[in-house]
Image: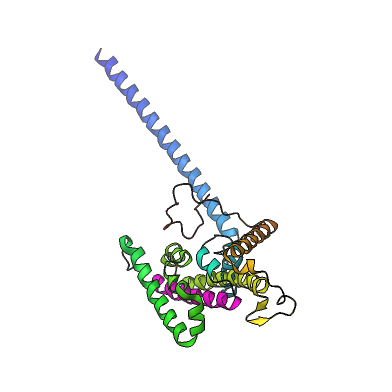
Amino acid sequence: MAKKTISMRSASQENSAAVIEETEEAMEEKQAVEQTEDAVISEAATEQPSAPEKKSSVGGTFGNAMKRGVILENPVLRLVLGTCPTLATTTAASNAIGMGIAATLVLICSNTVISLLRNIIPDKVRIPAYITIIASFVSIVQMLVKAFAPALDESLGIYLPLIVVNCIILGRAEMYASKHAPALSALDGLAMGVGFTTALLCMGTIREMLGAGSLFGAKLPILSGQPILFFSLAPGGFFVFGMLIAAANKLSKKNNLPVRNGCGDCPAAATCSLSGKGGCK
């Protein structure tokens, strides 16, 4: 019996050794296959030519920003922001240009300062801080206009200091300047200001020509005889505004530009009371 037990133990030990040897051989084969695959992948990576890096030029960045501000995301005709000063100050082309330049200066300066302070301003008080910065620059612009263009200051009236609460300026501060570098923020302010000024100039030119028969104060022989008073009044402003929006939408469809639906791309979404409630209908 002892001999049988010893023989059985030796047989089981031999079987265990054989199993261990087979397992080790299988692991060695698996490691060899993995090393071969890694070598093939590394060779393919070295042989494959690297994709050329895209270099962003200053001219391309400027052109894209201007295209976005004037056409793709025009704050007045595409995003329908700043409607109050748009309708109130466009009875004459000169007033429209003055309002547009003032808003552009505030946009550039406020965007730059907010971008510089974006990592310092606490998140909980960012909106009051933005309004304070914007109000400071509006006060500076208003004092300059009073000193060097008193007639323009009288024509713009209350709408010049109301630039402080303009949705365009506060919206760009929240959506762009607080998240980008100062140079890009200043460029964005310039582009949006040019788009705002362009829309105001188009409205002011049409309303002054048809409503007063003049352009920049100079009488037009063809239209000065019988001006259409309707275009100088508020209903005429709404009519021209609607026609320009229709023309902008037609242009966007012709060039396959994206249609803005909802609040996702609106620069005033963060401060708008309708954001999260379905947006503007």
> How many numbered marks have been drawn onto this rendered protein structure?
0
Query: Image quarter for residue 272?
Result: bottom left
What residue is shown at x 55% (from left), y 76% (from top)?
A: 95
Q: Is residue 52 left or right of 276 when viewed as pictured?
A: right
Query: Image quarter for residue 17?
Result: top left
Residue 94 image point, x, y percent: 58, 78
Q: Is residue 224 left or right of 118 when viewed as pictured?
A: right
What residue is shown at x 50% (from left), y 74% (from top)?
A: 104
Please say which color scheme the image uses.
rainbow
Q: Main secondary structure of the magenta part?
A: helix
On screen, residue 145 above or below 174:
below
- The segment highlighted magenta reads 92-118
Q: Nearer the viewer, residue 156 or 9?
A: 156
Q: Is residue 3 visible?
A: yes
What residue is shown at x 43% (from left), y 70% (from top)?
A: 162
Q: Residue furthest bottom?
A: 148
Q: Residue furthest left?
A: 2
Query: Image quarter for residue 200?
Result: bottom right
Q: Nearer the viewer, residue 58 or 123?
A: 123
Q: Residue furthest right?
A: 222
On screen, residue 18 above or below 97:
above
Residue 240 image point, x, y percent: 63, 64
* 107 part of magenta stretch: yes
* 195 part of magenta stretch: no
Q: Is residue 118 visible?
A: no
What residue is shown at x 42% (from left), y 70% (from top)?
A: 164
Residue 191 image point, x, y percent: 55, 71
Residue 222 image point, x, y percent: 75, 77
